[in-house]
Amino acid sequence: MADLSGIIESARRLGIELDEAEAAEWLRVMSAPAPSGDMVLDHRRGVYGHWVTMLDFSPEELERFRAIGSLVEIPDRPGEVETALALSGSAAQSRIQTYPGDCDFFERVNIIATTREGACEILGDLMREKVLATPGGVDHRFTEAKFGSYPAHVVRGGETIKAGSPITWTLDEVRAGAIEAEAPDGSPVAITWEEAARDPGWCKLDWIVADPFRERLANASNMLDVTWESPEGQIVPLDGMLDAYYQEVYLEAASVPIFSKVTRGLLPDALDDYVRALEGEVRKHVHDPANYGKAAKRMYNVFRFSGRYREAAYIRELFDEPAAALYQVAALIRTVDEASAEGSAIDDETVLGQLDALMDSVRVAMTAEEETKVLEPLARLRESLEADEDPARRVGFVHDAREEVEREVNEFFLGRLTELEEIRDYLESLKD
């Protein structure tokens, strides 16, 4: 079993609370021989996932996640569409993520059709129906969809977007069934929803939800891994790549047969590919502009799936520190602004209550001198919301508050990560 002594010493030096018994038990389980099968099913609760992932999942908020999942999930169509909905990201690590980020969902959507073109058409219908059925209400607001890829360079909102980039759709654009942009030479460009469906690419749906369990706002997303099942039974990923399952907790045991059928096509080196992809993301987030909070979350997954259990055990403890709450604060500042935008039906008290909670988190996590730089723009944002001022005036308040919080998050994670020699050496290796 990996030695805890260096971790304990580093944690104590930095004032990090370390549950030595819990960390030792996690290290013991991780260091023991792996189970014969990598997937485990919790029969009592009806959830399943990779055995390593399940070690970090807490069932305490299962009812909450299933309630939000009912909003974001793509429904089955008997004989045509079968799905398996899962939690991913920090939501799937609820045992250790005291201050989780967004409510991230992942859904395998298997479409049974005669042709690939027919499967793409069905996918377009599914996603558009979901958006139009959930545009907004007192407990949610749709924000955007990722669907299709740009066939050529375009300019939208003054920004040049490269060919092959995913297309982002607003609610009004989904309703209209088309987006309007410009070619680099200034000529108008229109792309219809049906055209986007021919090359769906990265598919994702996003909402803001007024979480009834926590009485707070949350970002809720559903990333779709869509496959086409041909008449011969061949499973073909519509985006060209079948996603692995090392970071997901599936919410319904009844979806096991679908999950098993779809994932049987994963190659033996899928775990190695998953770790390499994560390391690429870590490398991206430690370079300018750096985001060491995002880097830490991905490093944890790299370490726990590559046998570097000491480093993983140390990072686990960082997620429980009050300063780690600032990672969530940075994302939710923008959420507060979007939830209060024109056309939103989310209750004003919920929005202001979320903002008050964010300000409380800042007071707990930062020193009096540090918190002033964040609380001042948040207070101005709150006053603007109460006065129902022009949303354009709030842009500066949101930007200033997020900038200060993100700077503090970076300093917290960078300082703690480099305290452990092995992680410091790992970060240095990424600079090459």
Image (cartoon, rainbow, N blue to C red):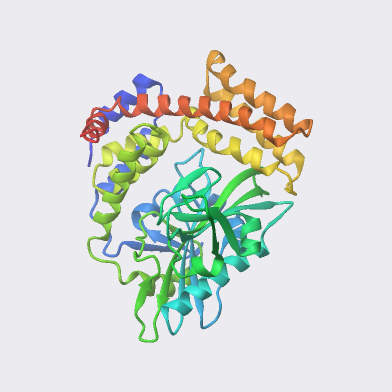
* In the rendered image, the vertical position of residue 257 relative to residue 332, given as above or below: below
- Residue at (42% x, 77% y) in the render: 116
Residue at (66% x, 60% y) in the render = 134
| Total count of labels | 0
Q: Quadrant of the C terminus?
A: top left
Q: Residue furthest right?
A: 387
> Residue 259, how many percent across, how many down?
41, 70
The N terminus: image quadrant: top left
Please, is residue 100 above or below residue 131 in the view? Answer: above
In the foreground, 184 or 382:
184
Residue 330 seen by the camera: yes
On screen, residue 341 versus residue 279, left or right, reads right
Residue 419 as seen in the image, left or right of residue 203: left
- Is 238 left or right of 78, judged from the image as shown? left
> How far across and down, in percent of the image, does residue 332 sit?
58, 38
Above or below residue 99? Residue 270 is: below
How far across and how far down the image is residue 319, in percent? Answer: 44, 36
Residue 297 location, quadrant: top left
Up the image or down, 211 lies above or below 82; here it is above
The location of residue 150, given as percent across then percent down, is: 45, 58
Residue 74 visible (yes or no): no
Report the residue at 36% width, 61% height from top: 243
